[in-house]
Image (cartoon, grey):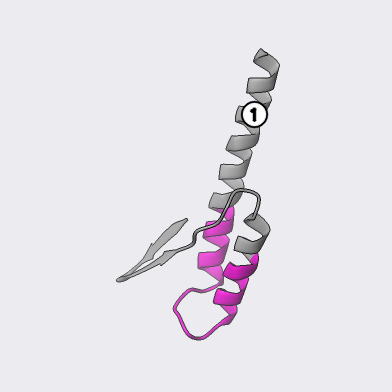
Amino acid sequence: MVLSKGDEKFIFRYAPGCEDELLEHMIREAKSNKTNFDWFDAAVLSFRLTQSLIGEANHLLHQNVET
């Protein structure tokens, strides 16, 4: 997942099935004062992640219905 914010770019890589670890990492980053990544940024990326997971679930559901 990538978030561009002004001159900064935040890149989060994760393995499928490790979305909970990604969310935990985004929370730690939002709490930290070391970067400009804030709670709004975490909310935006968590929304994108949720939409992606819903899309994957729909794809799997329709794949199973067709077989």
Q: Residue at 69% of width from left, 17% of height from top?
A: 65
Q: Above or below — where is 3 with respect to 49?
A: below
Q: Residue at 47% of width from left, 55% of height from top?
A: 1
Q: Which residue is mark 1?
A: 60
Main SS, magenta region, reads: helix
Q: Residue at 56% of width from left, 43% of height from top?
A: 52
Q: Residue at 69% of width from left, 21% of height from top?
A: 64
Which quadrant does the C terminus fall into?
top right
Q: Above or below — where is 65 with respect to 37?
A: above
Q: Position of residue 5 (x, y in %)?
A: 37, 67
| Residues drawn in magenta | 24-47
Q: Amino acid at mark 1?
A: Leu
Q: Position of residue 61 (x, y in %)?
A: 68, 26
Q: Above or below — where is 14 with respect to 32?
A: above
In the image, farthest residue toward the top:
67
Residue 46 location, quadrant: bottom right
Q: Is 11 placed left or right of 58 in the picture?
A: left
Q: Is 46 placed left or right of 12 in the picture?
A: right
* Mark 1 closeness class: few <14, some 14–19, many ≥20 residues within 10 Å: few
Q: Position of residue 26 (x, y in %)?
A: 57, 68
